[in-house]
Image: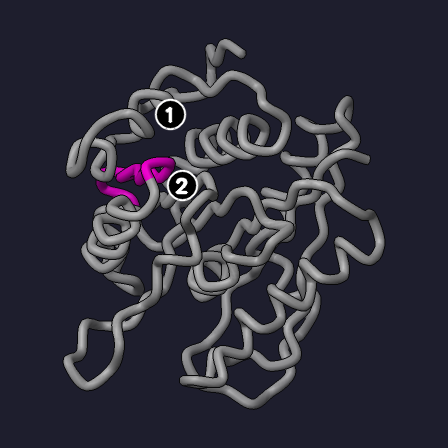
């Protein structure tokens, strides 16, 4: 075993209820299966993180705490192996927030839920992402999580970390269902490159190398993944 992906499901902004393990895992299960198949030769292990609470719950940031705890468990169980935090929706925020864990070398955030800009609330931190490879993917028609907020976060993060890119999935919504195959192929390309040093596809290379805003508004091409070259 030489790499771990921790899958962080969606959550709620505020909730003290315990999530249903089956329902929570549904949002990341297909992605986990794809990663496991792609990384079988390298011994990749994918685990779904089961949260204590459904909610982020303000400054408690419970989902990010659980992501950090899971990374600690990876170190305890597997030793010194690279970890990718891969989250969707509120799990995307948890992945970004917990990305500073010493075992984490990469972060993937799909349609991350991020708080609205508010002068009374400190902005979402980004310094913890320094030294990590980071990819954000967001649908331009997302009605649940504002894609402009993930763009602004990526802009701030890029100042402290060159290894960040963001892809826009034009006309797609929050679940990224319309272009699911392309999104999953993009996620696989990034995770296998970040964890195992596989060559990134040309679009990912270009997005990481491009200055902002180009590398942070990279369009995901229709059919991406059908002819990936590694």
Instruction: For the N terminus, give its image quadrant.
Output: top right
Instruction: For the C terminus, give its image quadrant.
Output: top right
Which circle marks residue 41 in the picture?
none
Query: According to the image, label 1 marks what residue?
Result: 204
As for residue 166 lying within the magenta part, the answer is yes
Q: Quadrant of residue 145?
A: bottom left
Magenta range: 162-172
Residue visible at 35% across and 58% down?
Answer: 126
Q: Quadrant of residue 59?
A: bottom left
Left or right of 164, for residue 76: right
Residue 119 at x, y percent in the picture: 15, 80
> In the orientation shown, which residue stands out farthest toward the bottom?
16
The secondary structure type at the circle numbered 2 is strand
As for residue 92 lying within the magenta part, the answer is no
Left or right of 209, for residue 192: right
Query: Dot 2, how many residues are within 10 Å of its Cα: few (below 14), some (14-19), or many (20+)?
Result: many
- Colour scheme of the rendered structure: one colour
Decide which of tag 1 and tag 2 comes sooner along the chain. 2
Asked if the residue at tag 2 contacts the one at tag 1, i.e. Cβ–Cβ closer than 8 Å, the answer is: yes
Query: According to the image, label 2 marks what residue?
Result: 135
Q: Calculate the distance from the C-alpha at mark 1 to the C-alpha at mark 2.
A: 9 Å
The secondary structure type at the circle numbered 1 is helix
């Amino acid at each position: 075993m030489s790499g771990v992906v921790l899958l962080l499901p969606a959550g709620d902004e505020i909730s003290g209820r315990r999530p249903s393990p089956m329902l929570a895992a549904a949002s990341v299960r297909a992605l986990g299966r794809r990663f496991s198949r792609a990384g079988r030769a390298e011994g990749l292990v994918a685990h779904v993180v089961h949260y204590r609470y459904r909610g982020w719950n303000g400054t408690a940031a419970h989902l990010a705490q659980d992501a950090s705890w899971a990374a600690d468990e990876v170190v305890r169980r597997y030793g010194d192996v690279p970890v990718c935090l891969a989250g969707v929706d509120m799990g995307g925020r948890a992945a970004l927030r917990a990305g500073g864990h010493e075992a984490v070398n990469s972060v993937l955030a799909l349609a991350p839920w991020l708080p609205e800009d508010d002068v009374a609330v400190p902005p979402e931190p980004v310094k913890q992402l320094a030294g990590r490879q980071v990819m954000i993917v967001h649908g331009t028609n997302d009605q649940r999580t504002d894609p402009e907020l993930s763009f602004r976060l990526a802009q701030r993060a890029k100042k402290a970390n060159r290894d960040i890119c963001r892809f826009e999935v034009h006309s797609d919504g929050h679940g990224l269902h319309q272009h699911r195959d392309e999104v999953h192929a993009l996620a696989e390309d990034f995770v296998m490159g970040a964890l195992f040093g596989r060559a990134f596809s040309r679009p990912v290379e270009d997005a990481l190398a491009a200055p902002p805003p180009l590398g942070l508004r990279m369009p995901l091409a229709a059919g991406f993944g059908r002819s990936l070259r590694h």
